[in-house]
Amino acid sequence: MPGRWELFVRDMKRDKHLYILLSPYMLLFLLFTVFPVIISIFFSFTNFNMLEFPQWVGWENYSKLLWNDDVFLIGLKNTIIFSVVTGPISYIACFVFAWLINELNPKVRAFMTLIFFAPSISGNVFFIWQIIFSGDSYGIMNGFLMKTGILYEPILWLQDPKYMLAIIMLVQLWLSLGTSFLAFIAGLQTVDRTLYEAGAIDGVQNRWQELWYITLPSMRPQLMFGAVIQITASLAVAEVATALAGFPSVQYGAHTIVTHLMDYGTIRFEMGYASAIATVLFGLMLGSNLLVQKLLKRVGE
Amino acid sequence: MKIALLMKRKINRSWQVDILLFLLLGGFGAFMAVPLIYVINNAFKPLDELFIFPPTLFVRNPTFENFSDLFQVMKNSWVPFSRYIFNTVFITAAGTFGHIILASAAAYPLAKHKFRGHKVLFTVIVLSLMFSPHVTAIPNYMIMSTLGWLDSYQAIIIPAFAYPLGLYLMKQFMEQIPDALLEAAKMDGASEYRIFFQVVMPLVKPAWLTLLILMMQMLWGTDGGSFIYSEQLKTMHYAMGQIVQGGIARAGVGAAVAVIMMTVPIVTFVLSQSNVIQTMASSGMKD
């Protein structure tokens, strides 16, 4: 009987080529993804400014973050409002539009897929919304509302905290039909057609029942994947917010966890504190993903 | 009777709901398309048309002035615009190419072999899909500064090689390759590398095209983040930001850059659409 160690060595020798194929990717992945998460958690318990040697401070960063940092709480509140509103809406929109597009004939389907997917891949063209919601009368929105007589003078859409968050949500929704949208379109095309016929015989009355009892359960794997992509994206909102409302935004109306992280990490260089923010964000993303995965397992039951 | 019913392609469909749903699709389709149509039209508007009140959606007298202005004006600036284009193209091409090669090489053993640690590695990849790169931005900055990579192309390119989504999609797609095919190649005496390059890689062409689209879109839109400071290394996205900050007077030139920016990813997607959809079909996560 070979011992555990001998078995291990034998397996490693047998699979040597596999490890060689894996290693370039895995080394970089460890260096730029896994290792950063670990050091981020470690530095979150220190005060580190990149100049002096880090000092262990225990939970101080976290308690400061949660009890003494009002701006962080604004960012946290905005991020949560944001993800609770745009997350589910864009997830459902991805599915509904994929589902509607799926009923079209192939050529129209390809065209509509492009229309819905184009905003999310056209790079940073979302700046166009800055012109649409520009604060003077040359902005499309102001121009239109003034022409129709709803407004008498232009509104500073992106400087007024009353409108800021709503506009950013709108733009984020516009951008959000991306990877998961494509996964849903693809998932719908792989659903076994004979299931619908069997369903019709077994008494499925209308398309809503068809959706709940046949379509959704058949594409549960894609739904899970889509959920992960959407949750992660909706908690990480920052680019659109800073591009449209500026950084920092007026009265922190568009401040999010990620903009707070950038503030402390790349402007103030308080790396320990920034790491604590990153760790909170990490926990929030991982936690909500695992929770939603649990919920999705019940679809169609 | 039943047979006749089944022959019709659409079961369980009522036309009233059909009309309602397609109105919905049309309405939201317009919402998605109008800003893009507007930016394309703006790029061709002469200066006086940009200032019409109320602003118009469509261009009346199209002109290429904005595009020629872009190159004229930017040529005289400190860094010529062509340099921004070069930076963006170079970062995108190198990052995408490296990612496709490394991610496929790592996906093959994970998809088709059982070896020590394969489950752990895949679990870590799936977990890393659940948080965005923002989480690791600060430590990555420290790593870059330790490696001396700040203010260089590789600070953007090398981490892109190891982006988790690409490996995940590639691995899911490779799982569909029949084992018998790989067994046959092995019987004929092919090494793992040969199987990978000559059997697996040609079979997963749709997946490469998908990674190409996803990585290209990500890198094409990069602004260099907090890693790049010198003007000579900055990207088109950054330049576009600067132009747009110039306000309404530069709106036409800004739209011209935007059109250049969006054309490349959209055209690539149109060309590879069916492959992308095919790959995404295998993207799902099992419970």
Image (spheres, coloured by chain):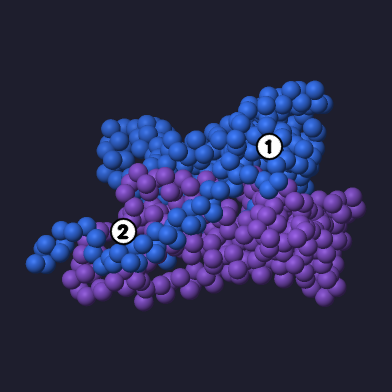
Chain colours: A purple, B blue
Residue at screen point 49% across, 62% down: A93
Residue at mark 1: B49
Residue B39 lies left or right of residue B227; in this view the side is left
Q: Which mark is residue B76?
A: none
Residue at screen point 84% across, 70% down: A69
Residue at screen point 80% across, 33% down: B230
* Letter of the chain that mark 2 sits on in the rendering: A
Residue at screen point 65% across, 34% down: B45
Residue at mark 2: A191
- Whether residue A178 appears in this view of the structure is no
Could you say whether the residue bearing mark 2 is in a helix, strand or loop?
Answer: loop
Quarter holding the N terminus of chain A is: bottom left
**How many numbered markers are drawn?**
2
Q: Which image quarter: residue A49?
A: bottom right
Q: Position of residue A139 (x, y in %)?
A: 71, 50
Mark 2 neighbour class, 10 Å CA radius: few under 14, some 14 to 19, many 20 or more: some
Quarter holding the C terminus of chain A is: bottom left
Q: Nearer the viewer, residue A49 or A82?
A: A82
Q: Position of residue A283 (x, y in %)?
A: 65, 67
Could you say whether the residue bearing mark 1 is in a helix, strand or loop?
Answer: helix
Q: Position of residue A229 (x, y in %)?
A: 54, 58
Disc 1 from disc 2: Cα separation: 50 Å
**Residue sitting at the far right:** A52
* Letter of the chain that mark 1 sits on in the rendering: B
Q: Are marks 1 and 2 in contact (CB under 8 Å)?
A: no
Q: Kindly identify the amino acid type of the residue bearing the numbered disc 2.
A: Val
Q: Is disc 2 on the same chain as disc 1?
A: no
Q: Nearer the viewer, residue B115 or B1?
A: B1
